[in-house]
Image (tube, rainbow, N blue to C red):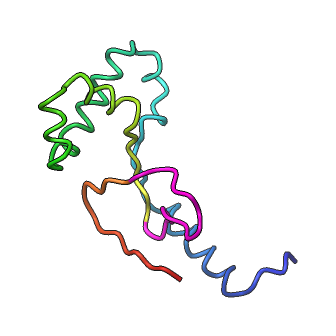
Amino acid sequence: ENDISGNLAMRTQRQAKSRLSEQSRVTREDVVLLSALSQTLQRQLHREICEPKLARHPFFHIVRNVDPSWFEEFLFKAVQVEFPRQDDDIFFAGRLAQSAYYLSHGLVNYEQD
């Protein structure tokens, strides 16, 4: 009906079924009550989630030790926790990057068409 190739239709159905069966991780945006917390408490929660992972990187480890206030501000304003799923695209050829990624665990398969 929509002139979609059989291959694309099959891949779309397979991924949709797979993702619906997965248990997704809860993100900050999923928890509505977090927005009701004071900004101070929100910042502390965000710092405790992000700091241990970022501080493992030598650059961020130094920055955190040299200027803890700046590092906390950086975490709150610039660091966002994401959980890309298998086969998600995080880079697009020919497009200007909007983000930088720091992989805390897992693997990324980079392929250029």
Predominant SS along the magenta part: loop
83 and 72: which one is in front?
Answer: 72
Q: Position of residue 90 (x, y in %)?
A: 48, 62
Give the image quarter of residue 23.
Answer: bottom left
The number of numbered discs placed on residues in the rendered structure image is 0
> How far across and how far down the image is residue 111, in percent?
44, 79
Q: Residue at horizontal 84%, vertical 81%?
A: 3
Quarter of the figure with the N terminus: bottom right
Q: Is residue 105 left or right of residue 18?
A: left
**Above/below status of 93 relative to 79:** below
Q: Is residue 13 left or right of residue 22?
A: right
Residue at 17 percent of width and 42 percent of height: 55
Q: Nearer the viewer, residue 99 or 14?
A: 99
**Nearest the eye: 41 or 103:** 103
In the rendered view, tell whether residue 37 sits above or below residue 16.
above
Residue 48 in the magenta stretch? The answer is no
In the displayed structure image, the side of residue 46 where residue 88 appears, left or right: right
Magenta residue span: 86-100
